[in-house]
Amino acid sequence: MSIGIIGAGNIGAAFARALAQAGIPATIANSRGPDSLAGLVHELSPWIKAGTIEEAASSDMVLVAVPWSRLPKALAGLPEWNGRIVIDANNPIEAPLFRSAELNGRLSSEIFADLVSGARVVKAFNHLLPALVSGDPQAEGGKRVLFYSGDDAAAKAEVGALVDKLGFFGIDLGLIAVGGSLVQFPGGPLPALNLVKFG
């Protein structure tokens, strides 16, 4: 299964580092073009290569982690998703003020899903601090917990398998209506918690 990453900020780069550490290849892209990612690609060679957003978006599984206000532009004009898996790793806030975006009573993942119509959306990788995503998932004698949720069982199973390959202890929080609200930042009770599963 090919993996793409749209967004090379803190979360996207941390996910790329986690993949590279596990020996899993991926294509990463941002709005500034492949040349701007030369340093990251050199660091994570040979596993991570830079591409265009279109190239990253053509993968079987695509993680998206883009500043909230830039999501519509970043995802505009891409080929049909056709049931491919898209991981929503976004939070409805932006630096430097970290004010919550206006969601009009909806979950951020519901708004995100509208931008990737036809994709099977799984919410994951947004709730841990980036340093924990790219750090050693073996923690204090246990495995660091990583939550995920989604409405498509097969897509969740694929993401769960990836979480396992990366060395985390995955916990399925159920449908996005439930899990998406638990991990949404700000608002949910689970973001930034560094939980470890023992045994």
Image (spheres, rainbow, N blue to C red):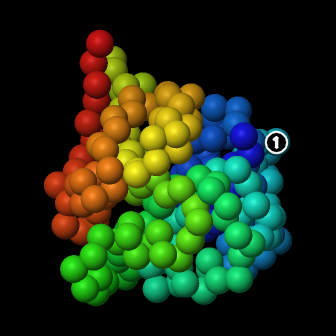
Circle 1 residues within 10 Å: few <14, some 14–19, many ≥20? few
Indicate the position of residue 132 as horizontal and vertical percent values.
Answer: 41, 44
**Residue located 61% across and 46% down the image:** 17
Which residue is nearer to you in this view: 41 or 195?
Answer: 195
Which SS class for mark 1?
Answer: loop
Q: Quadrant of residue 184?
A: bottom left
Q: Is residue 113 above or below residue 63?
A: below
Which residue is nearer to you in this view: 46 or 182?
Answer: 182
Whether residue 119 appears in this view of the structure is: yes
Q: Quadrant of the C terminus?
A: top left
**Residue located 71% across and 83% down the image:** 77
Indicate the position of residue 88 as horizontal and vertical percent values.
Answer: 47, 61
Q: Residue furthest top?
A: 199
The residue pinned by badge 1 equals 46
Indicate the position of residue 32 as horizontal and vertical percent values.
Answer: 72, 80
**Number of numbered callouts drawn:** 1
Indicate the position of residue 95 as horizontal and vertical percent values.
Answer: 39, 79
Report the side of 60 relative to 130 (left or right): right
Q: Quadrant of the N terminus?
A: top right
The three-letter code of the residue at mark 1 reads: Pro
Which residue is nearer to you in this view: 149 or 163?
Answer: 149
Q: Quadrant of residue 6?
A: bottom right
Report the side of 41 relative to 181 (left or right): right
